[in-house]
């Protein structure tokens, strides 16, 4: 039964990886005919996501991550503890809702870097230095690409309207 369950989950992960790879190819090919401003976001997503996708494919082929029982990078573990799996799912949903609320209240420039720091430091146990570096990279992408190259107009964070 466990071997069959593992085989089914391996098959499911192969399907998921194939769908993601297909979506990356579709995004990139479609963006070739778009204006630069519209094509930049999908191309950035493909360029940043492709190394992670390749690493996941290699890991799937080697089955190293499947020996531990992890499903992609969501923090789930295969096993006989549905309460733990439910807590992980609730944690992921709470993080997403909290990130959306933080973006609404504080804006993208504050919420995204701090959200990434929080996730990496507490959930990923990445340490202060790596969490700070990744957070600053997120801020650099927001300011460098979205503010200076694309001239994106951001929503006014709720905190600004409350402080007036």
Image (spheres, helix red, strand yellow):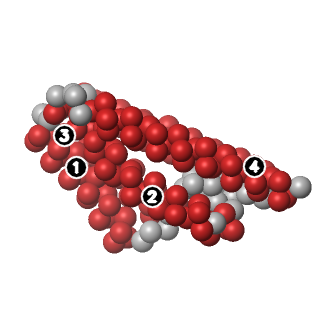
Mark 2, residue position: 54
Please indicate, yes or no, whether residue 141 appears anywhere in the rendered image.
yes
Alpha carbon distance from label 4 to label 1: 39 Å
Q: Which residue is mark 1?
A: 141
Please tell me which of labels 2 and 3 falls first in the chain.
Answer: 2
Q: Which circle's residue, 4 or 1, is located before the other in the chain?
A: 4
Tag shown at residue 146 = 3
Residue wearing tag 4: 8
First-in-chain label (3 vs 1): 1
The foreground one among 149 and 128 is 149
Residue at position x 58%, y 44% in the image = 16
In the rendered view, does 134 fall on the left or right side of 81? Answer: left
Residue at 83% across / 59% down in the picture? 3
- Marks 2 and 3, Cα distance to the nearest angstrom? 27 Å
- The quadrant in which the C terminus is found is top left
Q: Are marks 3 and 4 in contact (CB under 8 Å)?
A: no
Residue in view at x 63 percent, y 66 percent: 63
Q: In this rendering, would 9 be left or right of 98?
A: right
């Amino acid at each position: 039964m466990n071997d069959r369950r593992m085989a089914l989950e391996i098959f499911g992960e192969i399907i998921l990886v194939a769908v993601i790879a297909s979506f990356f190819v579709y995004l990139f090919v479609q963006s070739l005919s778009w204006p630069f401003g519209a094509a930049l976001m999908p191309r950035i997503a493909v360029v940043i996501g492709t190394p992670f996708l390749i690493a996941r494919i290699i890991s799937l082929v080697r089955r190293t991550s499947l020996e531990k029982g992890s499903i992609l990078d969501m923090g789930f573990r295969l096993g006989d503890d549905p309460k733990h799996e439910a807590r992980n799912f609730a944690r992921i949903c709470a993080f997403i809702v909290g990130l959306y609320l933080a973006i609404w209240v504080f804006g993208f420039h504050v919420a995204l870097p701090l959200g990434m720091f929080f996730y990496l430091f507490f959930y990923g146990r990445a340490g202060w230095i790596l969490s700070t570096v990744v957070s600053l990279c997120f801020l650099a992408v927001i300011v460098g690409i979205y503010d200076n190259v694309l001239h994106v107009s951001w929503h006014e964070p709720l905190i600004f309207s409350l402080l007036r």
